[in-house]
Amino acid sequence: MKTPIQLQQQNLEEIGSRIPVPNYNREANKTGIVHIGVGGFHRAHQAYYLHQLRQLGEASDWGICGIGLREADAKLHDIFNKQDHLYTLMVKHPDGKIEPEVIGSIVNFKMGVTDSEPVIACMANADTRIVSLTITEGGYNFNPTTGEFNFDNPDIQHELRHPNDPITVYGFLTAALKRRRDNGLPAFTILSCDNIEHNGDMARKMLLAFAEVQDQGLAEWIAQEVCFPNSMVDRITPVTTKVDIETLAQNYGVQDAWPVTCEPFIQWVVEDKFSNGRPAFEKVGVQFVPDVGPYEKMKLRLLNAGHSVLGLLGALHGHPTINACIEDQTFKTYLRAYLDEEATPILGNIEGIDLEDYKDSLLERFANPNIKDSVSRICSESSAKLPKFLIATIHDNLATGGSIKFATLIIAAWCYYSDKGMDRHGHPIEIIDAMSPELHQAAKQTTTDPLAFIKQESIFGNLIKNERFTKLYTEAVHKIYNDPNIKKHMENMI
């Protein structure tokens, strides 16, 4: 076993004899992209694409400065400082092969929690031409039923009163854009990389809603000058485990406090609509299209919804990971039935995509035994995810007379999951959701009011008023509460 080498810039030459490392001069990088929300996905996706481009000798003026707006980001900030903003990406193949590579495209990381000025200054710097986002569905601060901006958020109220003391992404964006406007600098592009349909349009709508209340003149400038391209992103990126860190150290001789693991598959489809230039990402496989809508919808309604189908049902059954769910033939068959009978019919034709091949590839990706994506991660923040991924499909099928039976069982399972918080063996389920208290409160009333859970209008919209849905849902809830063996109910449907 090789003695592990600490991942740092000064050690790259030695590390390079063990695994691939950046071949470019990182000190020559300018910060052209500021990215808010540097989680595992960003590091496996956008930062990886930029790294590939840098390896080709391109994009030296597009280095990434990461931004942390949450206290939880302090851990990564500290690790990045010790590792010179380097990290290892470990691509895990289905056959067990692991391909580690040191990524060098992130050149700085700033925390906005304790001191907002360095972050605003970085975003307002003339070199910065793109501000990109992976802030999760919940970070957009909108009501999922009305689609309108949530001005009741206390942090938003604070920012409206104190525009120079930002807390949320909206406060920081408006502060930086105001400074650019006042200094005569062109606007940057705001590039959403989140799993929201029409994510760029949503970012634009929410930012303008906020800016119009904070500063009407600035809102008019933003509306005219800032581009918000829609984009579709895809790469399964599980939470890093201690085993991953140990594997990298023991098998490859690299000591990295926070590597990132991912699957081989990667995709990024972007509308070619930028305010102030962009990297030549098409040279490393990014697709630039005039309308990303059909691709977004396909991914959200098939991949993301498919994850939630397996996650919620798998959690109740006791499967720990997504690949364990797919290894169970009942779960695999149920998922394919949902994708074929309920999700696919509402998608229509998508240019350049064979939906049958795409669904086949999803099942193969979910089955990757080396990814081991935990069901708890997949189920996290379901209250923000399911309205876009699954409930929207129910609404569409109700409107067209399509099947809703598979999705309805998922909603009933989510109710039981939120109420009991345990699997069929009585083992506790880890529930990670900002709305967990409200979900639990509504779900626990199910025994006396079978429809209590779906009366949460902010999540379910007007489903409570649809007799076809409520009849099926009541039947499904009754079955699960009388017998929580979810697999039996799935088998009866397929």
Image (cartoon, rainbow, N blue to C red):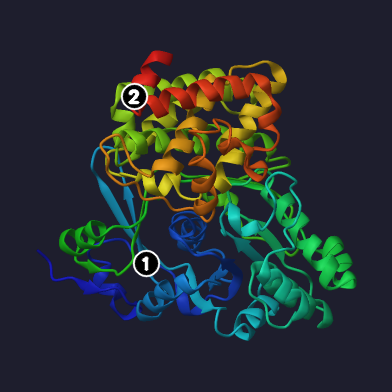
Residue type at mark 1: give it. Tyr
Secondary structure, mark 1, is strand
In the rendered image, residue 155, in percent from the top left (x then y), is placed at 66, 71
Residue lying at 64% horizontally and 19% vertically, measured from the top left: 468
In the rendered image, residue 163, in percent from the top left (x then y), is placed at 75, 79
In the rendered image, residue 467, in percent from the top left (x then y), is placed at 67, 21
Residue 51 visible in the picture: yes
Q: Is residue 420 left or right of residue 428?
A: right
Badge 2 or badge 1: first in the primary sequence? 1
Would you name the residue on which mark 2 appears? 487
Quadrant containing the C terminus in the rendered view: top left
Q: Residue furthest front?
A: 448
Would you name the residue on which mark 1 appears? 87
In the rendered image, residue 245, in percent from the top left (x then y), is placed at 25, 62
Q: Residue furthest left?
A: 1
Q: Is residue 399 left or right of residue 415?
A: right
Residue 458 quadrant:
top right
- Mark 2 Cα-neighbour bin, 10 Å: few <14, some 14–19, many ≥20: some
Tally of numbered tags = 2
Residue lying at 50% horizontally and 55% vertically, measured from the top left: 49
Secondary structure, mark 2, is helix
Residue lying at 35% horizontally and 45% vertically, measured from the top left: 373
Q: CA gap, disc 2 to disc 1?
A: 40 Å
Q: Is residue 349 above or below residue 425?
A: above
Residue 297 quadrant:
top right
- Mark 1 Cα-neighbour bin, 10 Å: few <14, some 14–19, many ≥20: many
Q: Is residue 115 left or right of residue 88?
A: right
Residue type at mark 2: give it. Lys
Quadrant containing the N terminus in the rendered view: bottom left
